[in-house]
Amino acid sequence: MSENTFDKVVVHPLVLLSVVDHFKRSKQAPQKRVVGCLLTEGPPEKTLHITNSFAVPFDEKLEKPDVWFIDHNFLETMFEMHKKVNAKERIVGWYSTGPSIRKSDLDIHEIFRKYTQDPAFVIINVHQGDGALGIPVKSFRSIEEVKKDGQESKRTFKHCPSEVGAFEAEEVGVEHLLRDIKDTTVNNLTTSIGSKISALKGFKERLNEMSKYLQDVLAGKLHPNHLIISNIQDIFNIGLNLDTNNLNSQISITNNDMTLTIYLSSMVRSVIALHDLIENKIQNREIEKRLRMESFKKTQKKEEEKLKQSKENNEKKK
């Protein structure tokens, strides 16, 4: 059993591609999910880098959450094959396509505790569309929950910070892959505006979450967590004060400068397009003129040959 204590999970691109490929090949119904094993090759660190994965046969009954099956023998055989290719790799957890935690996940998590002391449970949402906010990755670890009233303690999932990251070699491979799927018809301005809109939507969603939490605390539905409240206070303290006239003036000037730049760019683009159109028409006229001259010369040459041949025929008759 390998030891694995972490505070943060970083999922690498190869894992995301493998999970999506696993789900597509399994041809599962939208409400069903697939399960697999997560691997890494680095030593135990506070930041867990998940660099590889493989699929594991899994099935469950949706109407009976307690009835499920996972192939232990296949998992161990595949891991031994991976060890032959890369001896540094070790099991660090398992993944599911979720998109949320289910009743049987704690039991599945206990199985992976046989291979690593503190396995990571990563939910990778393969159904997340382009317009969705945030990354399609959620990471969890299991902790012992101690009851205050003397009841038997039990394990539960605790959320861990997660992100999508890559090493330098992986970044190069991802850039080459994106060249084939990137829409080249979308200009940089459109992409920039779309990114800002997505960021504002995400910011609004986070504000709604904070507002709902504070309202639940006030209503007595949740116990106040001083760390969360302190973080919310820090967020608003570092925010911009939009009530000052100086800041409003600076924002207006910056906005006007950007608008002027966009206007001038559009004008320059229109002038260049008009110039290219005129140049194209001039070139077409010159080509047509040259073709007409060549056609006229050919016709004139044929007439001269006919006239010469007729003269020769008349001389022969004489």
Image (cartoon, rainbow, N blue to C red):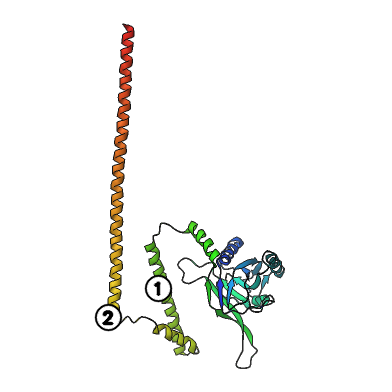
Tell me the quarter of the picture where residue 249 sits. bottom left
**Residue at the spot of label 1:** 200
Task: Tell me which amino acid carries mark 2.
Answer: Asn
- Where does the image place residue 28, in percent across and percent down from the top left? 59, 64
- Where does the image place residue 5, in percent across and percent down from the top left? 61, 80
The reply to whether residue 282 is in sight is yes
Looking at the image, residue 221 lies above or below residue 273: below
Residue that protrudes farthest toward the front in the picture: 168
Mark closer to the chain start, 1 or 2:
1
Tell me the quarter of the picture where residue 194 sits. bottom left
Q: Is residue 181 left or right of residue 92?
A: left
Tell which of 183 and 288 is nearer to you: 288
Tell which of 285 and 73 is nearer to you: 285
Rendered residue at 31%/21% (across/down):
303
Q: Is residue 248 left or right of residue 187?
A: left
Q: Secondary structure at mark 2?
A: helix
Q: Secondary structure at mark 1?
A: helix
Count of numbered tags: 2
**Residue at the spot of label 2:** 245
- Where does the image place residue 19, in percent across and percent down from the top left? 58, 66
Rendered residue at 33%/11% (across/down):
313
Task: Tell me which amino acid carries mark 1.
Answer: Leu
Q: Residues within 10 Å of mark 1 (few under 14, many from 20)?
A: few
Looking at the image, residue 128 lies above or below residue 203: above
Q: Residues within 10 Å of mark 2 (few under 14, many from 20)?
A: few
